[in-house]
Image: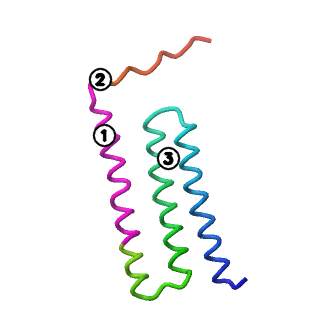
Amino acid sequence: MTPREAAVLLCALGAVAMFGLATVGLFRLPDFYARAHAVSKGDTLGTLFAVVAVGLAGASISEIAKLTFLVAFVFATTPTATHAIVRADSTDADRPSPPEAEDP
């Protein structure tokens, strides 16, 4: 295995790990805001690792330029969309109040 193939493999495994952790966060975290945060970060970093793996796998200069624009687009839109969704929920008047803390 060449060093380039090892780097591609590590980036691909990093992408799988980030997407997997985002999925775990989606199911295990307690509230909507924490879940949205986990999915947003995991999706953004997983996409970065996947695109870097594709770029290292043998892309030409023009393909690397396109991948760079793709990463920039994902980095700009994913956190912005997540923020807009969370903000829309936080301004919703029909939101239930948080549960009361139990006395020990």
Reply above or below: 5 against 22: below
Mark carried by residue 5: none
Reply above or below: 16 against 65: above
Mark carried by residue 38: 3
- Taken as a whole, is the magenta stretch helix, strand or loop? helix
What is the secondary structure assignment of the residue under circle 3? Answer: helix
> Which residue, given by chain and number where applicable, does mark 1 sit on?
87
What is the secondary structure assignment of the residue under circle 1? Answer: helix
Reply above or below: 98 against 66: above
Residue count near mark 2 (Cα–Cα under 10 Å), binned few <14, some 14–19, many ≥20: few
Q: Assign the C terminus to one quadrant of the image.
A: top right
- In percent of width and height, residue 47 lies at 48, 63
Q: Which residue is farthest right?
A: 1
What is the secondary structure assignment of the residue under circle 2? Answer: loop
**The residue stretch that appears in magenta:** 70-94
For the residue marked with disc 2, what is the amino acid? Answer: Asp
Whether residue 83 appears in magenta in the rendering, the answer is yes
> Which residue, given by chain and number where applicable, does mark 2 sit on?
94
Residue count near mark 1 (Cα–Cα under 10 Å), binned few <14, some 14–19, many ≥20: few
Q: Pick the residue in front: 18 or 104.
A: 18
The answer to which quarter of the image holds residue 16 is: bottom right
Reply above or below: 82 against 56: above
